[in-house]
Image (cartoon, rainbow, N blue to C red):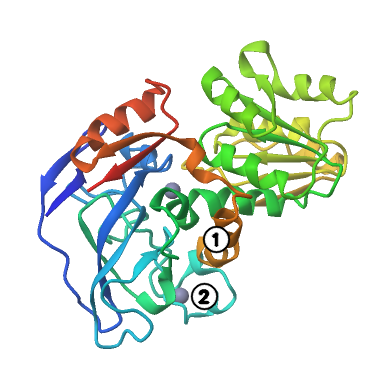
Amino acid sequence: MNAITFHGVGDVRAQDVPEPRLVDPTDVVLRITTSAVCGSDLHQYHGRGGGALVQTGAIMGHEFMGTVEEAGPGVQGLARGDRVIVPFSVSCGRCEWCQRRLPSQCATTGRAVFGGRFGHVWGGGQAERIRVPFADHLCDKVPADMRDEDALFLGDILSTGYCCAENGGIRPGDTVAVFGAGPVGLLAMQSAQLFGPARVFAVDRVDYRLRLAEEFGAEPVSLDRGDPAAQLRAATGGRGPDVVLECVGHETPFTQAIQAVRPGGTVSSVGVYVEPSMGFPAREAFFKDLSLKMGICNARNYMGTLLPLVRLGKLAPARIVSHTLALKEAPRGYAIFDRKEDRAIKVMLKP
Ligand SMILES: [Zn+2]
Ligand SMILES: [Zn+2]
């Protein structure tokens, strides 16, 4: 089958690879109907994270959905032909952390992610087919009337954006600032609106992304106009936003988020940090009495909750899709997404 594989920094290729097969009785093999390039795929693409992230030749991608082609004898709730979504992280559903509703901390799989990150190699979803283990636990069926582009992002970026907003504890009337108007940030803005904020600000440098943020009800704050924390304080009568959602994952926006938030406010961070440590404005955070919530999204917990909101149009993740490419065009998809060329925001791939 055809798949997108990793060959070094900035080098992903469409390649012929062996077909995945059922290994454990609880596996299914999916025929993938749509996959996507995620912002965190770019960490691999750039070889960030000490080179331990992904092996040469590994199949990329952890955002995918598809149709069950084969189900192992231990699979009870799925049959050939079922259309399903799958979360980005591989979890067993049975270990202590899965039982505590922390599937992204799964002890059985060692916090594995489809697509070979964190040193555990599971085939990725930028392919024609994929083996999905623990299938009864991981797969959610998709209603027939739902398009792939509406369902796909439940497995990763929509759940991540929503979880960022939820962790911020937004209350009606609050002022919210979202750092990063990439795919996760834009979906965090859509999600934030569900909690009834009075104002939402979008902080980014890329103009076309800020324009889309405006369509989601956000007021743009351009990094080209100087310190965003100062701009946010100025726009809120000097007090700062009640809640800041950090959707970038670097030291600078994290620090600016802490500097921007009002005393007693909350900073919620879902950006993927690849550096093992970074500077933290501890004194400011302490004297501000702020709350900090950060971490990798347990997308498995959110897929079923958010699906009706997408189906009813209260969340509209497909609006961030800028490109739909054939799978073999993925190398170009990575390049334009990485360089923010051709107004790229979210690249979907069709095997
Ligand atoms: Zn992702
Ligand atoms: Zn587990």
Q: Does residue 296 appear to the left or right of 170 in the view shown? A: left
The x and y percentages for residue 10 are 26, 31
Looking at the image, is mark 2 or mark 1 nearer the viewer?
A: 1
Image x and y of residue 267, in percent: 72, 43
Q: Residues within 10 Å of mark 1 (few under 14, many from 20)?
A: many
Residue indicated by mark 1: 307
Q: Amino acid at mark 1?
A: Leu
Residue 188 horizontal/vertical position (percent): 62, 43
Q: Residue at x 42, y 70 (%)?
A: 141
Residue highlighted by disc 2: 98
Task: Bin the neighbour count of mark 2 within 10 Å (Cα to Cα): few under 14, some 14-19, many 20 and up.
Answer: some
Residue nearer the viewer, 187 or 217: 217
Left or right: where 172 falls relative to 42? right
Query: Residue at 25% across / 29% down in the picture?
Result: 332
User: Counting residues from the N terminus, which is met first, the one under dot 2 or under dot 1?
Assistant: 2
Question: Is label 2 in contact with label 1 (beta carbons under 8 Å)?
Answer: no
Q: Nearer the viewer, residue 44 or 132?
A: 132
Compared with residue 343, is residue 285 higher up or lower down, i.e. above or below?
Answer: below
Res. 124 in view: no
User: Tag on residue 186?
Assistant: none
Image x and y of residue 131, in percent: 25, 67
Q: Is residue 236 above or below residue 297?
A: above
- Quadrant location of the N terminus? bottom left
Local SS, label 2: helix
- Furthest toward the top, the residue is 225
In the displayed orientation, state which residue is furthest to the front.
Answer: 145
